[in-house]
Structures are given as structure tokens and as C-alpha cells.
């Protein structure tokens, strides 16, 4: 019988209970969906790293001889090591693709992951194992021949296998931040395939026990001067880039459910409180008929329990099955993994169970007070709340305040809990909208800052390593361009060590360093400027000294910081060519930038990219981030609609008797509608004001999860606030208009005599 009653009540109050169901569903759906994608990425990449035995670190040197290998292996933490010769080559194709060759001594660390063909054979001097994406782009298959050119040597090999490498989950060329698999690739070969007798190994992969920083310090103490640099696994360009991507997605999945779950519980609490208040007489009759307090509590607690249970389980099932599929197309165009599958986590179950338990607690809190009353008291209508004279009402100006404002103030004071729930709901909607539009503005500004405010060229020509200075000068003169030097560097302070970049400007005005407000930062010929993000990571400032070296060189330099600039995507040093030479380092141009649009090929140029190509690459790289932003905006708007409508409905039903009384006294429908609209706007305004700083805090958390490469500070623009206000207040007004008909068609007898 009670089950039938529950179904009738749910049907009668279907809008409120549908809101509870939707909030429970959306909370778990988004958490499990985005979480399933991020956990799936983590599981897939970790399995990939484990299957291929990814190295814990890489030691770089010009020539790693057997003596050096023995020294590294004799270090107590070292458990395994393997040498490679890694060098750049050009494939024998029309577009001269860059192919990184790995001549391996063994295939035990960072192993080649085979997809087609035969396993990598260390004794095979005629075979090559090729990058699958490059092979697909060039329509190459197992058994085909491919020719490589490097250091004046031409080498032809037969493709024995096609697959992936754990070192190339993310792989982009110097001219683009997005992989173009027709222009870049990698290949693995046996050391026997090297065309010279002695293999000049330049990379040593190591596995070790303990902390990477401790191992790096041990290398510095024991082998100082015997090698150029050491890169731990987390600092490897491929590993760190993919890790930053996962962190962004994980942060998004953590933020979403908190708001939805909170709102679901608030709606459940207000709904159950109202239902129980309206059913006092029924509860009294049930008690008088012999129903125990326990059975009545169980009956009302089950209302929210079943809805939250069904919504949570449905979200738990559908989330990982649907949302990850939205991200994988854009992710797979940038990153390379053998498989793209969502994964489950016990955290999804924990959140679902927590939400269900919270629904029980909330429902019990709503019914517990009335369950303790005796049947004689419960069967009588609850005495209406009496509004006492408050502090504000004692002032003389109170009598001059309009009836509309006085009535709404007193109604809010009588129904503090409902007012609080409405304000909290608006805070949640506003916070999500502010953070969503803030991310949108940040991504848009970041692109404008990098590709318009800092860089003013049309084409960038990447110089071939074998090009002579005269050839470089000739190309620069022909395209009316300026030469730049860009290099990867490692920086170290007293507290931290980070990988970064070096940009050497040669008097060009086509690249303009700026501060965070996009104002030009003038760096004189004798000054060194460090990016603000790198300065924060290293814990240094102007006047401090930083130790650094160019990757591939064992020469460490101590440099005093003279200026600090800001850059959205490149963190490190900027200096002039004169300053670089003053530091006793060679100025070696790596690219030429020009305002002209260059289409012609030059023998000294490895690749050419236009600003249009670079912005297109940026758009493709950030496609998954844009998708997250759009999802956030959609669900924030949906949350606003559900919350404001549901709370508006609760507000109307709670003051239905008062509205009917005012109608009897002669108030017209328009005046009553204005009365409700005023209250809605009050609560919306308060929630909006309080929601903005909450949204700023969420935005700050999301930007901080973007990794060491990106530098974006949270900011809220006027347009952001205007759009958020328009959406929030428009929905509030729309909800008010939806109740106009209810006021007009109000049953006066039922409303006024219902409590009797």
C-alpha cells in the first residue's frame, strides 16, 4: 500500500523528482564518463609503458663507451641499461620527411611495440622496423624497401615490422606542435645495420630503484663531466605532454560531480521537506492506523533512494560508454597508443554509493522530526510560521519601502531554508558558467597572444642541421628573413630542476617578448630574460642565478636573471646572440622567420610552415580542451534550467496559500507575478554575486592542471560576467513566466481550505 502511495506522490510531483533523478544521473554520468576517459588513458598508456618496459631515465652524451656503461651499471640503484644511437635522417620521399633512427644494442628497454611483421632482430643488419603512422601515411607495408639519408650517408633497408614506440606517444616536428605523420616518423634498427664499424652511441636508457632526483644527483656526483644530461621519465617530452593532457581531463571529471551531487541533495531535501509538510495529516492517520515510526520513515526515505539509485546506476553505465567516444577522435589525431578504451575505476562506485547514502541521510533528516510527534499532534495542520519584527523593520525607512519589497523580505525570512537552497543552486550554476566562459576566453587569448602579439611572421623555415652558414645567409637574404636559434635546455636552481627552451633573438622585430598584459618587454643585448612560469617553477626572480645547459652539451652555465617576460606556451630563456657568445656558447641558427609567404623549397631548409599552418595545428592540439569547455557550458546551462525551475516550483507551492489570500484581497495576476519575480531576482542576484568568486576558484584549479608548459592566469572578463548574468537572469525570468498561468488558474478554495 505504501509503495502505491509512493508512486502516486512521485507522479504528482514528477517535476521535482525528475530534477532529482537528472541531477543524480548527470553527476555520476559526467564523473564516470570523463573519468572513464581519463582513467582509460591512464590505464592504456601505463599498460603500454609496462609492456614495452619504458626506461626510467635517459642519459645523453656524445659517445657512450663501454667504460661509461660499466660506471653506470656499477651504481647501486641501476638495475638495467641499454645504449642507442639516435640520429635524424631524411626519408627518400618528395617532401623529405624527418625520420628519427634508433640503432639499438638490445630491445629490452623502451621496446619497439610490434603491430605487423616480425619481432625486432638484433642480428638483422638489413631490416628496419618502422613507425606505423608514418607507414600508413606513405602506404608502406612489410616487405617494402625504404631509403634513409643522414650525415652524407644513404642507407636502404627492408621493412621487417611496423609498430609503435613508448617514446613517441606524442611526437611533433620543430615546425609544428601537432604531429603530421606524413612528414615525421621514427624507425628502429639493429646496431648491426649501422654502416660503420663502431657505433657512436649517444643515448643510454636506464632502469633504477629509488627517486629520480636522487639518481640524478648520484650521476652528477659520480660521473660529473662524463655525460651531457640526464632526463627522468616524467620530464621526457612525450611522457610529460601526455601526462599534462590526462591531468586536465582528470581535473574536469573531479569538478563536475561535486556541483551536481550537491544540487541533487539540496533539491531532494527541499522536495521531501515540502511533501512531508503537506502530508502531515496523512502521516497522522497512518500513525493512528497502527503504522510504526520505522515503517513511515522507511516509506519516505525510499522516495529519494530509488530515484537516486536508478539515476546513479544509469549514469554509471552510460557515462563510460558514451562520453569517452567524444574525445577519442581528437585525442588519437595527436597522441599514439595501441588501444583507446575507457576504463572503470572503483572511484565511480564510491561516488555512486556516496550519493545513494547521502540521499538516505537527506530524506531521513526531512522526516525525522515529524516521525517523533504523537498521532494527535501530527494529524493537525502545522501552525503557520509567524514572522516577528526584525532588526531592519525597526528603522524608520521601513514604512517607506514598497509592499513588494516588504512582503518578499518577510517571506524569505519565514522560509530561510528555501531561500538558502535557491541561492546555493544559483551559485552552482554561476560558478560553472563563469569557469566555462573563463576557459573559453583563456584559450582564445592564449592563441591571440602567441600567434599575433608575440610572433609577427608569416612563414617559419626550419634549417637543416647540415646547412652551412653561407647557405643559411643566402636563404635569409632571399626571403628577407631573420635568423633565430631555438634549443632545448635544462635549468636548475637551488630548489628545482626543469626542462625548458632557449630562444636567441638576432635583432629581429618579428618576435616580440611580452609581459602577461601583452606589453613589449625590451631585452637588451647584454640581458637574459626568463619566462614567468619557469621562474615560478624554479622559485627564482630578477637578480637570482640559474644554472643551465643546452641539451646535448655537458657545458653548464651560471646566468643571472635580468628580466622576466611571459609566454603562454614556451618556458625558458630569451637572450641575444651577443649575450650567448659572451657566455662562451656558439650561436647556431635553427630557423628563419619572414613576413613573406614562402612556398619554395631550399636545400638548406628542412621544413617550412606558415602562420596559418601553425594556428591550424594549435586548433587541432586543443580540440579536446575545446570539447571539454563546450560540455561544461552545456551542462552548466542545463543545471541552471533544472535548478531554477525546480526551486521556482517549490517556491510557488510553498506560498500558494499566501498568493490565494492576496488574490482575495484584490491583487491582480500581474502584480502577483511581479511579486514572485522580485523574489527570484533577489535570490538570483545574491547567488550570482557569490558564484563569481567560486567560478574564479574553479577556473584557477583547472588552469593550474594544464602543466608546466602552459602559462595562463585565471581571469574573468566583463563579457564573461555579462553572458553568465544574461543566461542566469533570463532563466530566472523565464521560470517566473512559466508560473504566470498557475497564478491565473489557482484554485482558491483548495488553496485556502486545504489546511482545514
Image (spheres, rainbow, N blue to C red):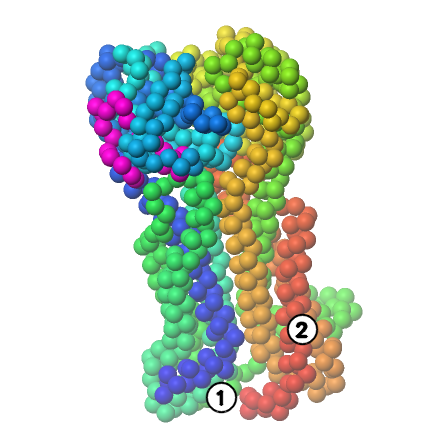
Q: Say whether residue 342 is magenta.
A: no
Left/right placement of residue 136 relative to residue 77 reads: right
User: Residue 56's image quarter?
Assistant: top left
Q: Circles 1 and 2: CB distance less than 8 Å?
A: no
How dense is the environment of label 2, judged by Cα within 10 Å: few (below 14), some, or many (20 and up)? some
Relative vertical location of residue 206 with respect to residue 379 in this rendering, above or below: above
Total numbered circles: 2
The residues colored magenta run 115-136
Relative vertical location of residue 202 with respect to residue 364 in this rendering, above or below: above
Name the mark on residue 737.
2
How dense is the environment of label 1, judged by Cα within 10 Å: few (below 14), some, or many (20 and up)? some
Location of residue 718 in the rendering, given as x and y in whole percent from the top left corner: 68, 48
Name the residue tied to disc 1: 380
Q: Residue at x 24, y 33 (%)?
A: 119
Q: Residue at x 45, y 27 (%)?
A: 93
Q: Is residue 166 visible?
A: no
Amino acid at each position: 500500500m505504501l509503495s502505491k502511495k509512493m508512486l502516486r506522490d512521485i507522479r504528482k510531483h514528477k517535476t521535482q523528482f525528475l530534477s532529482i533523478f537528472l541531477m543524480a544521473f548527470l553527476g555520476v554520468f559526467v564523473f564516470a564518463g570523463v573519468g572513464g576517459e581519463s582513467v582509460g588513458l591512464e590505464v592504456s598508456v601505463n599498460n603500454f609503458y609496462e609492456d614495452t618496459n619504458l626506461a626510467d631515465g635517459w642519459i645523453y652524451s656524445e659517445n657512450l663507451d663501454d667504460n661509461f656503461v660499466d660506471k653506470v651499471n656499477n651504481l647501486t640503484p641501476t638495475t638495467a641499461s641499454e645504449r642507442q644511437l639516435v640520429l635524424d635522417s631524411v626519408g627518400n620521399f618528395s617532401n623529405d620527411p624527418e625520420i628519427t633512427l634508433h640503432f639499438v644494442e638490445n630491445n629490452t628497454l623502451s621496446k619497439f611495440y610490434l603491430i605487423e611483421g616480425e619481432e625486432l632482430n638484433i642480428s638483422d643488419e638489413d631490416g628496419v622496423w618502422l613507425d606505423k603512422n608514418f607507414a600508413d601515411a606513405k602506404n608502406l607495408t612489410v616487405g617494402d624497401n625504404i631509403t634513409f639519408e643522414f650525415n652524407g650517408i644513404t642507407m636502404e633497408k627492408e621493412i621487417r615490422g611496423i609498430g609503435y614506440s613508448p617514446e613517441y606517444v606524442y611526437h611533433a616536428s620543430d615546425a609544428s606542435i601537432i604531429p603530421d605523420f606524413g612528414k615525421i616518423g621514427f624507425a628502429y634498427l639493429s646496431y648491426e645495420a649501422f654502416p660503420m664499424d663502431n657505433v657512436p652511441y649517444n643515448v643510454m636508457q636506464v632502469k633504477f630503484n629509488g627517486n629520480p632526483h636522487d639518481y640524478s644527483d648520484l650521476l652528477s656526483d659520480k660521473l660529473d663531466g662524463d655525460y651531457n644530461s640526464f632526463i627522468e621519465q616524467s620530464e621526457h617530452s612525450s611522457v610529460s605532454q601526455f601526462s599534462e593532457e590526462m591531468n586536465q581531463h582528470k581535473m574536469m571529471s573531479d569538478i563536475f560531480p561535486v556541483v551536481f551531487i550537491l544540487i541533487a541533495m539540496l533539491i531532494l531535501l527541499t522536495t521531501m521537506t515540502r511533501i512531508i509538510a503537506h502530508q502531515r495529516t496523512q502521516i497522522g492517520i497512518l500513525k493512528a492506523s497502527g503504522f510504526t515510526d520505522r515503517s513511515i520513515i522507511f516509506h519516505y526515505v525510499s522516495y529519494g533512494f530509488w530515484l537516486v539509485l536508478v539515476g546513479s546506476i544509469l549514469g554509471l553505465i552510460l557515462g563510460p560508454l558514451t562520453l569517452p567516444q567524444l574525445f577519442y577522435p581528437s585525442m588519437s589525431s595527436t597522441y599514439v597508443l595501441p588501444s583507446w578504451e575507457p576504463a572503470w575505476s572503483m572511484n565511480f562506485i564510491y561516488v555512486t554509493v556516496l550519493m545513494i547514502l547521502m540521499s538516505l541521510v537527506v530524506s531521513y533528516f526531512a522526516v525525522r522530526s515529524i516521525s517523533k510527534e504523537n498521532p494527535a499532534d501530527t494529524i493537525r495542520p502545522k501552525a503557520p510560521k509567524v514572522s516577528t519584527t526584525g532588526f531592519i523593520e525597526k528603522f524608520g525607512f521601513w514604512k517607506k519601502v514598497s509592499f513588494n519589497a516588504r512582503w518578499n523580505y518577510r517571506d524569505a525570512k519565514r522560509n530561510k531554508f528555501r531561500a538558502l537552497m535557491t541561492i546555493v543552486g544559483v551559485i552552482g550554476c554561476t560558478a560553472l558558467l563563469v569557469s566555462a566562459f573563463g576557459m573559453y576566453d583563456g584559450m582564445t587569448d592564449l592563441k591571440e597572444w602567441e600567434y599575433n602579439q608575440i610572433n609577427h611572421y608569416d612563414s617559419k623555415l626550419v634549417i637543416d642541421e647540415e646547412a652551412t652558414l653561407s647557405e643559411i645567409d643566402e636563404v635569409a637574404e632571399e626571403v628577407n628573413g631573420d635568423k633565430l636559434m631555438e634549443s632545448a635546455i635544462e635549468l636548475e636552481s637551488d630548489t628545482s630542476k626543469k626542462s625548458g627552451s632557449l630562444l636567441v633573438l638576432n635583432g629581429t622585430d618579428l618576435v616580440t617578448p611580452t609581459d602577461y598584459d601583452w606589453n613589449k618587454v625590451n631585452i637588451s643585448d647584454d640581458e637574459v630574460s626568463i619566462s614567468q612560469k619557469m621562474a615560478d617553477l624554479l622559485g627564482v626572480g630578477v637578480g637570482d642565478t640559474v644554472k643551465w645547459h643546452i641539451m646535448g652539451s655537458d657545458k653548464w652555465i651560471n646566468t643571472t636573471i635580468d628580466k622576466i617576460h611571459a609566454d603562454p606556451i614556451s618556458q625558458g630563456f630569451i637572450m641575444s646572440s651577443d649575450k650567448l657568445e659572451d657566455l662562451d656558447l656558439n650561436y647556431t641558427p635553427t630557423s628563419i622567420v619572414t613576413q613573406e609567404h614562402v612556398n619554395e623549397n631550399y636545400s638548406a631548409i628542412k621544413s617550412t610552415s606558415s602562420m596559418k599552418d601553425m594556428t591550424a595545428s594549435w586548433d587541432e592540439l586543443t580540440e579536446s580542451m575545446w570539447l571539454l569547455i563546450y560540455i561544461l557550458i552545456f551542462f552548466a546551462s542545463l543545471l541552471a534550467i533544472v535548478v531554477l525551475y525546480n526551486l521556482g516550483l517549490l517556491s510557488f507551492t510553498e506560498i500558494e496559500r499566501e498568493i490565494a489570500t492576496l488574490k482575495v484581497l484584490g491583487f491582480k495576476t500581474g502584480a502577483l507575478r511581479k511579486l514572485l519575480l522580485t523574489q527570484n531576482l533577489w535570490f538570483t542576484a545574491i547567488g550570482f554575486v557569490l558564484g563569481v568568486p567560486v567560478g574564479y576558484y574553479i577556473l584557477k584549479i583547472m588552469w593550474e592542471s594544464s602543466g608546466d608548459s602552459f602559462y595562463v592566469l585565471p581571469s574573468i572578463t566583463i563579457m564573461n560576467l555579462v553572458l553568465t548574468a544574461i543566461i542566469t537572469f533570463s532563466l530566472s525570468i523565464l521560470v517566473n513566466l512559466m508560473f504566470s498561468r498557475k497564478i491565473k488558474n489557482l484554485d482558491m478554495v483548495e488553496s485556502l481550505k486545504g489546511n482545514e
